[in-house]
Image (spheres, helix red, strand yellow):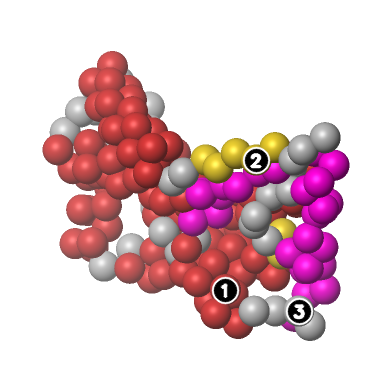
Amino acid sequence: MTAHQIEIPALPVMLPLGVTLMIVFAVLLRRRGLLSVPRLLVGWFAGWYAVAVLGATMLPMHLGWGPETGGPDLERFLFLPILEMRPLDFVLNTIMTLPLATVLYLVFGVRSERRVVRIGFLLSLAIESTQLILLFTLDGNRWADVNDLMSNTLGAWLGFLLLRRLMRSGRFRRVVESCSFARTAHGTPAAVR
């Protein structure tokens, strides 16, 4: 039997997904009565941020199956924290999740440090688990790395700390709250904690 391979390219997936998310955000904001240019721009940023994370962590995706694939490349599975760290990847993964706290704050109303860190961890765990499953089942080309789990979580936490610090400025806080999707029962933006 021969090995079968498929490549899922990045742009043909990312571009339609990004445009679809732009439309979804516009429709959702309109239905909720929250449509404004600043909120629309925030929604579009959040959508393209999600697409960029997908592209950075999964695409392009090379998959293979069949007896001649040679099995999974176990060197792509790094499970010893710090000992097998690739420093540049650690820094890039930390930077990748810095905007997560702001997206969670503006779009979903997540204002708790603990929730931001937990969501950053769970998002990273989902990414790394998917990469690991693809590595072992379909000869995937991505790395499954416990250091990425740590760096993504660190990035989410640092992003939260940065946002909290910036929110101390009344002017910055007013601009951010005017772009927030979250509303209180009174129809005003939720309070900053």
> Considering only order in the chain, which callout, 1 or 3, is on the residue closer to the N terminus?
3
Q: Is residue 78 left or right of residue 99?
A: right
Residue 163 vertical placement versus 43 (above, below): below
Circle 2 is placed at which residue position?
A: 5
Q: Nearer the viewer, residue 96 or 135?
A: 135
Q: Position of residue 49 (x, y in %)?
A: 39, 49
Number of numbered markers: 3
* Residue drawn where x is 20% and y is 28% of the image: 35
* Badge 1 element: helix
Q: Is residue 142 left or right of residue 17?
A: right
Q: Is residue 110 left or right of residue 73?
A: left
> Considering only order in the chain, which callout, 3 or 2, is on the residue closer to the N terminus?
2
Q: Which mark is residue 77?
A: none
* Residue drawn where x is 14% and y is 38% of the image: 37
* Badge 2 element: strand
Range drawn in magenta: 56-82
- Identify the amino acid type marked 3: Glu
* Residue drawn where x is 77% and y is 38% of the image: 2
Circle 3 is placed at which residue position?
A: 84
> Considering only order in the chain, which callout, 2 or 1, is on the residue closer to the N terminus?
2
